Image (cartoon, rainbow, N blue to C red):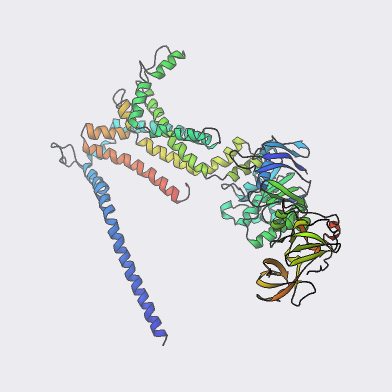
Amino acid sequence: MAEVRLDRVVKRYPKAAADALCETSLTFEDGLFTCVLGPSGSGKSTVLKLLAGIEDVTSGRILMDGLDVTNVTPERRDVAMVFQSYGLYPHMTARDNIGFPLMLRGMNKPDRYARVGEVAEMLGIGGLLDRHPRALSGGERQRVALGRAIVRKPKVFLLDEPISNLDANLRATTREELKRIHQQLRATFIYVTHDQDDAEAMGDRVVVMARGDVQQVDTPGAIYRRPANRFVASFVGRLPMNFIPGEIVAVDGRARFESGVIGVELRDQDPPASPVPVVLGVRPEGVRVARDPQPASVTGHVTLTEVVAPDEYATIAVAERTLRVRVPPEELAVGDEVSVTFAPSYLLFFDPENGERITFPTDARTGGAAPREAVAR
Amino acid sequence: MTAEPLTLTEGGNRLSRLSIRRENQAYAALFLIPTATLFVALIGYPVLYSLVLTVTGRSAVPGRLGPFVGLDNWLRITTDPIFIQAAGQTLMYVVPSAVLGVVIGLAVALVLNERFRGRGLARASLLIPWALPPVVVAAMFQWFLDSRRGLLGEWLVNAGLVDQPPLFLSGVPGTLFMLTAIHIWKTFPLIALIFLVALQYLPEETINAARIDGANRWRRFRHVVLPFLRPTLVAAVIIQVLITIQLFDLIFALTGGGPGRYSTYNLYFYTFKTTFEQTDFGYGAVLAYVVTAFVVVLALLLTRGRARGLLS
């Protein structure tokens, strides 16, 4: 088992305008399943290639269990990797593909095939071992690639979007299986993906990356509920977060968020001495709608409804803004007039300049607590 | 009420579909006429005419067919010592060219597939020997190998390996091997190019997977790259054999078939000599058919193999 650490690692490709990976220090904890999540070009695959050793760092060190492996070639690092398009050997049967790492380590044929058989049983591909990759489906190839990684019992598994080429159903079952395999092996898994469902379903930890920089490292739940900045807030989440620029002001000795017709009383927050410009962020489930006018709510019109089963969402026009809101299923129709209120525990505030999330001294009390209706004007 | 018009429409469709098909075939025939005419004129007629030539003897009047001699010309190849010698020497050209040419081509392709500074320039200059006109190559090597003023002789003397510049183009069978070496020098770029193209189709992921699986450079070559290139290897050997069977210009320009009378003859060169210098068109046509037979068999191997997916 191994802890993997990047120590002030920089990766710059020749002739590239920006660093593929800005100076990054990052620890992948021993035995945990860490998902590296980010859009394309975020540097997430670069991290994996550097860890595998198929790319060299420009500066910095890579440590495995405290040992400096920065200059160790891939064939001598004890890591296994599953590639996005699997990287199987086209001329070998599935059996020889899986057994290849063992053959290279000098294991004799009977032992090798016995071990391949065990791994194949674990992955449910025992009957496919005599086939060549071209005679296998995408899901089967993916299992062979996984088998090839598992068979040598490495300390670290690197997975580069290994299930992104599978269809949706297969992806869901494969996630469960990967998680099960991880629990069985208890090795360090580092899984790169652009799909937040992967991260949510499997990650013990999630590393969110953008533009070659680590944005946040946390559990999937915390990433969702307490994103470190606007990028994480908008990248994570099935539907985009609502952002409302405005300011926090003191009214009658209480803190309020104000933005045009929208106003929210912030009971748990101390009133600021002078107005603080902020961007309010609230996820679709943090906005409540009702058909009947609520005391001190704002009025809006439904302009669009969409089903993201099992939930239903509506786009609601409030003055000149549109809000994406989770609504009770099959209750609202386009054109309906609704009153809108905000659940204070869901409200996040971001710095309008740099996009960082602003935490106020009393923030801890509200984060994740049971929602209480705020009074909207 | 509705059934009748429907049937009519269907019948009408079938009719028009048929007539469209007939019209298409007419057009196809029309468009084929130019190519078909050229094919018959340039290939069909000469092939048939040369077949006629094989059963005629020497002609007394230039431009006229000679007397009918039956299968005499065909039977002559079984007893002709020069034919047998030329056939053997063809093999002496072909085997080393196929083996060494392909090995060198593969090695060069592997090097040029690596990333290094100046790779673009190296790849471009690779093609120089292949792009040079054969006459230029011949003239170049004539100077290079000249026994009195040649560069190679001077190098060997200066290096202290020999006292006198050797006679590179005078020995038997040394001269034939010298020609083979020049031929390999001229053809390896083509072979390297074929391998280089094939290597572009080897996914980088597969190579990286092999590295991570623990394969060093040699193991990656032995277990991943070479099996991947196997179909290309077969194709490259066949192509090189085809090219070498048709080796002519170097022999013509450098040795004229000598030293001695026939020591660097191959079948192709013998065909040329018989037909155009001895003007024995009948026997020359037989020789041409023999060479063509070899070439056709190899070409079929190449195309059939590709069709079956053995190569590609």
**Residue A126 located left or right of residue B198:** right
Query: Residue at point 67% right, 43% down?
Result: A21
Q: Nearer the viewer, residue A209 or A3?
A: A209
Tell me, yes or no, if residue B79 can be seen here.
no
Indicate whether A310 appears above or below B109. Answer: below
Indicate whether B156 appears above or below A226. Answer: above
Q: Nearer the viewer, residue B146 or B163?
A: B146
From the top left corner, tell me how far across and down residue B116 is, in percent: 55, 34
Indicate whether A87 appears above or below A299. Answer: above
Q: What is the total number of numbered labels drawn onto the structure image?
A: 0
Q: Nearer the viewer, residue A244 or B127?
A: A244
Q: Quadrant of the N terminus of chain A?
A: top right
Indicate whether B251 appears above or below A348. Answer: above
**Residue B74 located left or right of residue A121:** left
Q: Residue furthest bottom?
A: B1
Tell me, yes or no, if residue B131 can be seen here.
yes
Q: Residue furthest left?
A: B61
**Residue B220 located left or right of residue A28:** left
From the top left corner, tell me how far across and down residue A376 is, in percent: 79, 69
